Image: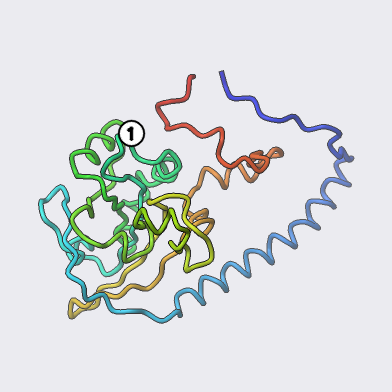
Amino acid sequence: MATQTSTIEHPRVLSHKEWINARVAFMAKEKEFTRLGDELSRERRELPWEKVTKPYVFDGPNGKETLADLFQGRSQLVVYHLMFSPGWDEACKSCSFWADNFNGTDIHLAHRDITLLAISRAPLAKLDAYKKRMGWSFKWVSSGGNDFNYDFGVTFEPETVKNGTAEYNYGTTRPMGEEMPGVSVFYRDQDGAIYHTYSTYSRGIDILNGAYHYIDLTPKGRDEDGKGMYWLRRRDQYKD
């Protein structure tokens, strides 16, 4: 049975003509939102870069792979920092919700000179088992043997989380645990130099979850009432 959420009381019901007028008026705001989004994307592309010089090596399906290897011959790399600590038996359910959006998308991105993959600290055997369980096909590698997660702001030392000194999302908030989600973007030039061009965290990764955008179109919206993602389960854990 589908999960029931709150009900909508006393909706504003209009005639068709009045409905069209209200919809057209709201569309002006949507068009402005789109325009601002396009401008934000342009400014994002114009942000400065930083050169990546640390020799990260990951455990992947092809054995040991460097950061350069992860580009798979393309010049742009998008990394989803998927929360899966080495001591966990399964990945974060919220990150799993996000990752459910990746299958198939990675193929389209590959034809735009972009490689999309996930990186987690759990050992490769755990990643492969969970990937099979979820039916995912995108590439997923382990950073358990290097500092990648720490350097890109998604993993924190236990003591810093406990004493409140850990900083997440460029110091704007405190992490809720030792693992947090995020997305990082890299560019590799013709000489093989790698640059970090962008990272985003927290609500900044909302744009990667197509399911939430569908939810936002509906009358109830996210309907989380300040309780966060209380309703969410891993895809194979819903009772129906």
Q: Is residue 224 left or right of residue 103?
A: right
Where is residue 88, by image quadrant? Answer: top left
Residue at mark 1: 134
State the residue at coordinates (40%, 70%).
198
Q: Is residue 118 left or right of residue 198?
A: left
Q: Is residue 90 above or below residue 202?
A: above
Q: Is residue 137 above or below residue 52?
A: above
User: Looking at the figure, which quarter contains the N terminus?
Assistant: top right
> Residue 122 versus residue 37: which sits nearer the camera?
122
Within 10 Å of the Cα at label 1, are there few (<14), some (14-19), or many (20+) other Cα atoms? some
Give the amino acid at mark 1. Met
Q: Is residue 222 left or right of residue 22?
A: left
Q: Is residue 109 above or below residue 221?
A: below
State the residue at coordinates (45%, 63%).
165
> Residue 156 versus residue 118: which sits nearer the camera?
156
Q: Is residue 27 above or below residue 131?
A: below
The number of discs equals 1
Q: Secondary structure at mark 1?
A: helix
Q: Position of residue 72 (x, y in %)?
A: 20, 61
- Which residue is most to the left? 63
Q: Position of residue 237 (x, y in %)?
A: 43, 25
State the residue at coordinates (86%, 40%).
12
Q: Position of residue 204 (x, y in %)?
A: 51, 59
Q: How is the image coloured?
A: rainbow
Q: Position of residue 64 (x, y in %)?
A: 11, 55
State the residue at coordinates (65%, 44%).
217
Where is residue 29, by image quadrant? Answer: bottom right
> Residue 236 versus residue 142: which sits nearer the camera?
142
